Image: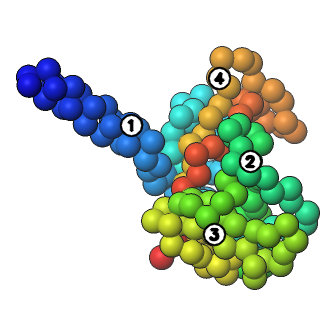
Amino acid sequence: MKNKMKKTLFIALASAMLVSCSKKEKGQVVTFEQYHTLNQNEENNGKRFAIVGYPFIGGDITVRGNATNESQLPQISFYEQPEGKGKMLATLPMENGKGKNEFDAPSTFTMDQVVFYDNDGKPLKHTDKMEVSFTLDLQVDRGKTTMGDKSVYYGGPSETRIDKAN
């Protein structure tokens, strides 16, 4: 009886740890200017950040089933204003599907047909202002590269979370 109770307690604790580790937390909101400097600082590796804007898919996009590799996920652009207007704030990886923090688009579509699902699984339209959080994964174990006049680390956003912005 004691062994069975210990085993049950162990399974419950392990399950709770897995759920808490996989939960995508909100990130620190950054401006357009701040976002474009995040990859310059090693200290930003592994931290959660967020941008606030509107999603827009301006051209062809290849939508596949659940990909296991972050780099294979479709990249969704976010703008200051709806319909891809204003500055493009960021391009973030997002899973295709109908679950939490995913987007759903038919094989051919207009933006009115695309549905985004927030962290609670509630549907959002592309005209809804969104706060999209992500983890910045930088390859700090290799040297920086030069992009224009900046010295940056390879890598980028992963583990996106979608929330409706206030």
Assign the N terminus to one quadrant of the image.
top left
Q: Mark 2 — residue?
A: 73
Tell me where residue 101 appears, x and y as whole percent. Answer: 57, 59
Mark 4 vs mark 3: which is more N-terminal? 3
Number of labels in the image equals 4
Mark 2 vs mark 4: which is more N-terminal? 2
Q: Mark 4 — residue?
A: 140
| 56 versus 145 height, above or below | below
Mark 1 vs mark 2: which is more N-terminal? 1
Q: Is label 3 in a helix, a strand or a loop?
A: strand
Q: Can residue 79 be seen by looking at this rendering? A: no
Callout in the foreground (4, 3): 3
Residue type beneath disc 3: Phe
Write the residue at 84% across / 75% down.
109
**Marks 1 and 3, how far apart at CA:** 25 Å
Label 2 with label 3: CB-CB less than 8 Å: no
Tell me where residue 75 appears, x and y as whole percent. Answer: 76, 53
Tell me where residue 160 appears, x and y as whole percent. Answer: 59, 52
Q: Mark 3 — residue?
A: 116
In this view of the protein, which residue sits in the foreground, 24 or 11?
11
Q: Which mark is residue 18?
A: 1
**Marks 2 and 3, how far apart at CA:** 15 Å
Q: Is label 1 in a helix, a strand or a loop?
A: helix
Q: Is label 4 in a helix, a strand or a loop?
A: loop
**Marks 1 and 2, how far apart at CA:** 23 Å
Write the residue at 57% across / 67% down.
117
